[in-house]
Amino acid sequence: MKFIVSSSALLKQLQQISGVINANTVLPILEDFLFEIETNKLTITATDLETVMKVHLDIEAKESGKVCIPAKILMDSLKNIAEQPLTFNIDKNYAVELTSDNGKYKVMGENPDNFPKEPAADDANSFTMTSTGLVTAINKTIFAVSNDDLRPAMTGVYFELDKAGISFVATDAHRLVKYERTDVKCPQKDAFIVPKKPLNLLKSALPDNEDELTISYNSNHLFVKHGGTELVCRLIDARFPDYKVVIPVDNPYKMNISRSDFQNALRRVSVFSNKSTNQVALTISGNELQLASQDVDFSFEGNERMACNYDGEDLQIAFNAKFLIEMLNGADTTDVNMELSTPTKAGIIKPSEQEPNEALLMLVMPLMLNN
């Protein structure tokens, strides 16, 4: 079996899916790419048993066949080969010979029958949304996903589907992000949790444009299709916490503040905070915000003052500065609005202006003030 492919086109496609492969896998075959050749079409698959990713490529081939090729050595060699047509020759023992303009390289492939079968999209419901819509949703929520494997439900992003649109929710019990889009038509009310790894893979594989994506799901798997790229992942089998009960309905005190000034002040002041809590205390009175942090063990202290628009009673409340800085990244407006009530109740951050079909709400739990 033999086929000819452009070296740079092949490398580009392999880089898209190589993130699926884990460094230390249980089964050696999972360190391989599965190459499937049909007339002038090549399909390459990578899997870690939880996530499967596929790309399609145009090639020159007379016959069809399949082979598994070790991923690392193939990628390492392609990175060092200039753009040119490469010829792959595969014999019946799955030995792969690569021929370039001025070289020949051999690698031992494996039997493709041992490669895990991908899950079928049985009884799947589907909807479409734009590529940029999904990429934005992932970017705005993924940082708040928990890394605590003891609470599996929180280690992914919760997709909540409704006739009115779709919501993406992520929480690690210290903060929560909810991003809604009303420009997506979902077939029915439904919900499922998508793990972090496939979302990160999608984020880098999908273009940030208005291309239509087809998203399908059944009780166990999510299927995403864009052009020649496909991703299938196993959903997290757990119940997502009832997040609506933690979102305060009435936070009477409102503060409007410049996003970048606030973020930079937090970055400067948090340098002097306790490294385990990253605590920064905010004291708001009139139209002035004071930021203060200290690390008693080292006698470090940082203080800053800045202007804000505040409507409410004087308040002192403490937050984890690292969380605030990450959340402010999610709001891409010049100003942000903060809604607060008491030093022990969650604060809410929203962008000052939102697109007509989007709504972003970020919630962060306060820390105990150590006066």
Image (tube, rainbow, N blue to C red):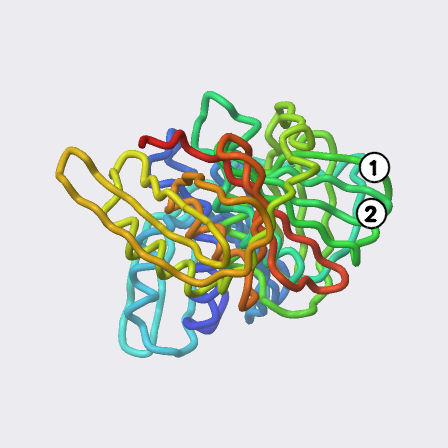
The answer to whether marks 2 and 1 mark residues whose Cβ atoms lie closer than 8 Å is: yes
x and y percent of residue 324 in the render?
Answer: 44, 48
x and y percent of residue 267 in the render?
Answer: 32, 55
Give the quarter of the figure containing the C terminus.
top left
x and y percent of residue 336 in the render?
Answer: 56, 59
In this figure, which residue is indicated by the disc labeled 2?
186
Rendered residue at 55%/32% (across/down): 345
Give me the disc on residue 234. Answer: none
- Distance, label 2 to label 1, CA atoms, is 8 Å
Along the viewing direction, whichever of 94 and 71 lies nearer the viewer: 71
Q: Residue furthest left?
A: 298
Query: In the picture provided, is 325 more to the left or to the right than 24?
Result: right
In the image, residue 181 sits, relative to residue 293, either above or below, namely below
x and y percent of residue 73 in the render?
Answer: 30, 54
In the image, residue 142 sits, relative to residue 41, either above or below, namely above
Q: Amino acid at mark 2?
A: Cys
Q: Amino acid at mark 1?
A: Lys
Dividing the picture into quadrants, the one containing residue 217 is top right
Rendered residue at 54%/35% (across/down): 342
In this figure, which residue is indicated by the disc labeled 1?
189
Query: In the picture provided, is 127 more to the left or to the right than 78?
Result: right
> The residue tagged with tag 2: helix, strand or loop?
loop
Q: Residues within 10 Å of mark 2 (few under 14, many from 20)?
A: many
In the image, residue 354 sits, relative to residue 301, either above or below, namely below
Along the viewing direction, whichever of 43 and 289 lies nearer the viewer: 289
